[in-house]
Image: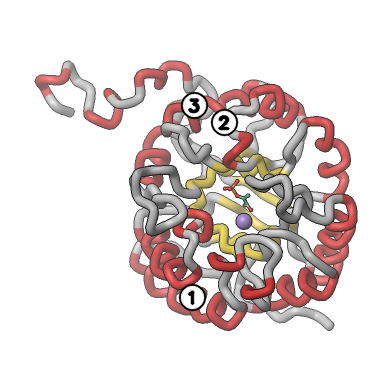
């Protein structure tokens, strides 16, 4: 506490809406929230890694990637079915076919799956297939979508808007929780700054700030946060060092042929190396990396 600031510290002064964080604010649940998805616990002592391709492209691509990331210790499979692309001429995702492939991958690997909901009209369809609903950066302030997702009973992966302040991010989570859904995982995925050598600026300040202000688990996405596959392992280590509960990592067997985000996607061998290297960092901050898994078949 700083005596000249009337008993508030800087972190508190920076967030004028703190009193509006009735449900997501740390004081609503000082012990922190753990979210259970099948046999995975997010927000506990383990670093939970969400991994998979940016977009589901084919059965071969998804299943081989899912098997590889599971064997390296990833716990949740990601894959876009409905893709929010900047250009309307870019690959928009395999949509329903991708949802079917994601549930096939879940059956074959036992991993829960996460995929993005772009529009509240897709919610029922996606909720039939996905274990976790992703709200993307571009949708973080789609308030009707947040309200719909708030009525769902599926866990939510809420990504920070690329131009959203931490306060706006937490108020978006408050919308979801106000609707009755308290299973929210926050994801720092980089923000827009004047810097253009990286796709975004990964805001690792956000991790300790969010952990202080809210009881929700926080994960970090260094793939979108940097835009460069070769930066991903280093920023992943940094994210764990500053207290993230997990990571979201894009992985592709042939990044040069990927239909989206190939430049930031790790090959499975590099992903595996990163998972090994994360072990020492996790241990240094009192966290555990899950053991590599055997994949049946
Ligand atoms: C994604 O995870 O593939 C994605 C589109 O991310 P973001 O919404 O953070 O851009
Ligand atoms: Mn992507």
- Mark 2 to mark 1 CA distance (whole Å): 30 Å
Q: Are marks 2 and 1 in contact (CB under 8 Å)?
A: no
Drawn side of residue 268 relative to residue 221, left or right = right
Name the disc covering residue 28, or none. 3
Please report the residue visible at 36 percent of the width from the left and 60 percent of the height from the top: 241
Drawn side of residue 285 relative to residue 28, left or right = left
- At mark 1, the secondary structure is helix
- At mark 3, the secondary structure is helix
Please report the residue visible at 53 percent of the width from the left and 46 percent of the height from the top: 187
Q: Earlier in the sequence, mark 2 or mark 1?
A: 2
Q: Earlier in the sequence, mark 1 or mark 3?
A: 3
Task: Estimate the x, y position of residue 257 in percent, counting from the top left.
Answer: 68, 73
Drawn side of residue 174 relative to residue 94, left or right = left
* Quarter placement of the C terminus: bottom right
The quarter of the displayed image where residue 185 is located: top right
- Residue 14, above or below 57: above
- At mark 2, the secondary structure is helix
Please report the residue visible at 84 percent of the width from the left and 51 percent of the height from the top: 95
Q: Is residue 132 visible?
A: no
- Mark 2 to mark 3 CA distance (whole Å): 14 Å
Q: Are marks 1 and 3 in contact (CB under 8 Å)?
A: no
Name the disc covering residue 173, or none. 2
The quarter of the displayed image where residue 84 is located: top right
* Quarter placement of the N terminus: top left
**Label 3 neighbour load within 10 Å: few <14, some 14-19, many 20+:** few
Task: Estimate the x, y position of residue 247 in percent, counting from the top left.
Answer: 53, 58
Task: Estimate the x, y position of residue 5 in percent, counting from the top left.
Answer: 15, 20
* Residue picked out by circle 1: 274
The one of 278 and 146 positioned closer to us in this rendering = 146
Label 2 CB sits under 8 Å from any ligand 1 atom: no
The one of 65 and 261 positioned closer to us in this rendering = 261
Task: Estimate the x, y position of residue 140 in percent, counting from the top left.
Answer: 59, 34
């Amino acid at each position: 506490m700083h005596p000249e600031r009337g008993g508030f510290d800087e972190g508190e002064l920076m967030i004028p809406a703190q009193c509006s964080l009735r449900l997501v604010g740390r004081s609503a649940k000082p012990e922190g929230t753990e979210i259970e998805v099948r046999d995975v616990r997010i927000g506990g002592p383990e670093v939970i890694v969400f991994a998979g391709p940016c977009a589901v492209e084919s059965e071969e691509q998804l299943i081989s990637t899912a098997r590889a990331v599971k064997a390296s210790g990833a716990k949740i499979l990601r894959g876009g079915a409905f893709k929010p692309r900047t250009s309307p001429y870019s690959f928009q995702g395999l949509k329903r076919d991708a949802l079917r492939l994601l549930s096939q991958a879940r059956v074959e690997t036992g991993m829960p799956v996460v995929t993005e909901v772009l529009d509240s009209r897709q919610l029922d369809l996606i909720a039939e297939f996905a274990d976790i609903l992703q709200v993307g950066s571009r949708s973080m302030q789609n308030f009707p979508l947040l309200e719909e997702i708030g009525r769902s009973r599926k866990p939510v992966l809420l990504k920070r808007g690329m131009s959203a302040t931490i306060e706006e991010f937490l108020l978006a989570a408050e919308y979801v929780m106000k609707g009755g859904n308290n299973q929210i995982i926050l994801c720092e995925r980089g923000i827009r700054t004047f810097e253009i050598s990286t796709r975004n600026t990964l805001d690792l300040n956000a991790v300790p700030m969010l952990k202080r202000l809210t009881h929700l688990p926080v994960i970090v996405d260094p793939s979108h946060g940097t835009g460069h596959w070769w930066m991903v392992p280093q920023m992943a280590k940094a994210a764990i060092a500053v207290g993230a509960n997990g990571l979201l990592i894009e992985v592709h067997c042939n990044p040069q042929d990927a239909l989206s985000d190939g430049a930031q996607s790790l090959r499975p061998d590099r992903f595996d190396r990163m998972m090994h290297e994360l072990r020492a960092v996790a241990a240094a901050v009192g966290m555990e990396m899950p053991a590599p898994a055997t994949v049946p078949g």
